[in-house]
Image: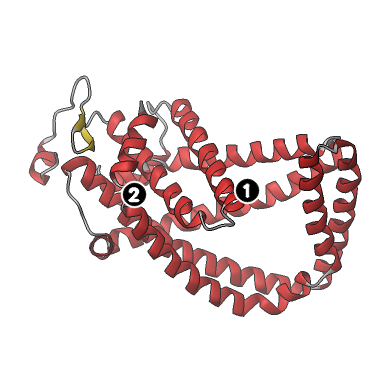
Amino acid sequence: MKFKHSFHVFVDNFSVIYKQLLYRLIVLVISGLICWAGVYPFIKTFINSEQLNTIIEGTKGFITTLLNGQINELADLSEKVQTAYAELIELFNTKLSQAILSGLLILLITVISKWFMGLGNYATASIINDKMALRAKQPFFSTLIRNLKSAAIYNAIYVPLSVLFDLVIVVAMFFLFFTLLNHVVYFFICLFLFVLAVVFAITFKMTVTSDWLPALIRGKMKHGAAMKYAFSRKNKNTFNVMSNFAVIVLIVFALNMAAALLTLGVGLLLTVPSSYVIIICFEFVNFYDREEIKYSIDKNTIISPAKERPLSREEFFRGDE
C-alpha cells in the first residue's frame, strides 16, 4: 500500500517536477562550467589516450556482441578491456599530482552543487508535505526562500555524509567490477553482480536516511533530534522499507536507462527530477503511516490510520493537523 499511495502522491504533485527540472538545470550548468574549466587540461590527456578509446570501443563491442547473441566472443572482449584498463592505470600514475588536484576540485564542486541541489529537494519535500497535510499549493521558489535556513543546515550535515558514503561506494564498486572481471568466467554474470551490489548500496543509503526530511518538516524536530530519529531503526520495520526502496531504485534505474537509450537522453529531462520526487513522496508516506497521521493522496482521498494518534499539547498549539 505504501508504494501505491506514494505513486498517487507523486501524481498529485507532478507539477513540482518542472520546478525541480528548472532549478537542477541551473545548478548543473553553473557547476558543470566551473568544473570543466578547472579540470579540462587533465581530462584532455585521458580523452585523447589510446587506452580509454580501447575501453570505450570494447564496451561498445560487448553491447553489440551481446545483442547479436555472439556469447563466445565476450571472453576476448573482456581480456581486451582488462589490458586497456591496466595501461590506463599506468598512464594515470604518471599524472598523479594533476589527478589529485583535479580530483579535489571536482570533489569541492560536487559537494557545493549537491548542497544547492539539496536546497531544491528540501523545498520539494516541504511542498509535498503541505499538499499531503493541508491540500495547500505552495510555489516552489518562495518555499525555497522561506525554508532556506533550515534547508541550509540540513544539507550542511547531510551532503558531506552523503558524499563520503558515495565516494566509498564508487571506489568499492570500481575495484569490485574489475575483481569480478578477473574471477568470473562470464562477463554477463559479472555485470549482473556489479549492478546488484550498486542497487543494494543505494537502497541501504535511502533506507537509513529516509526519515530525516520528514522528521524535520512534518515532525518539526530540531536538526539533532531529526538526525538521531533517522538513524535509529527501532520499530521501523526496516526490511519492509528497504524492500520498497529496492523496487523504487530498480524502477528508477530502468526508466532512466530507457530514457537515455530510447530518447537519446531527452527523456532524462523528465525522468531524473521525477526520480527525486517519487523518492521524497515515499519517504513522507512511510513517515505518515508509521506515525499514524492522516494524509491526503489526492483531492478526493484521505488516508486515515486504523487508530489515529491524538495530538500532543505541543502539536495542538503549533497548529499541526
* Image point (65%, 68%), residue name: 103
Quadrant, the N terminus = top left
Q: Could you tell me the amino acid type at mark 2?
A: Gly
Relative to residue 114, is residue 38 drawn left or right?
right
The residue that disc 2 covers is 224
Count of numbered labels shown in the rendering? 2
Pointer 1 local density, CA inside 10 Å: few below 14, some 14–19, many at least 20: some
Q: Which mark is residue 169?
A: 1
Relative to residue 39, is residue 48 drawn left or right?
right
Of the residues under marks 1 and 2, which one precedes in the sequence?
Answer: 1
Find the distance from the CA under tag 1 to the CA under tag 2: 26 Å
Relative to residue 101, is residue 316 drawn left or right?
left
* Image point (34%, 47%), residue name: 213
313 relative to 124, above or below: above
Secondary structure beneath label 2: helix
Whether tag 1 and tag 2 are in contact, CB under 8 A, the answer is no
Picture quadrant where residue 295 is located: top left
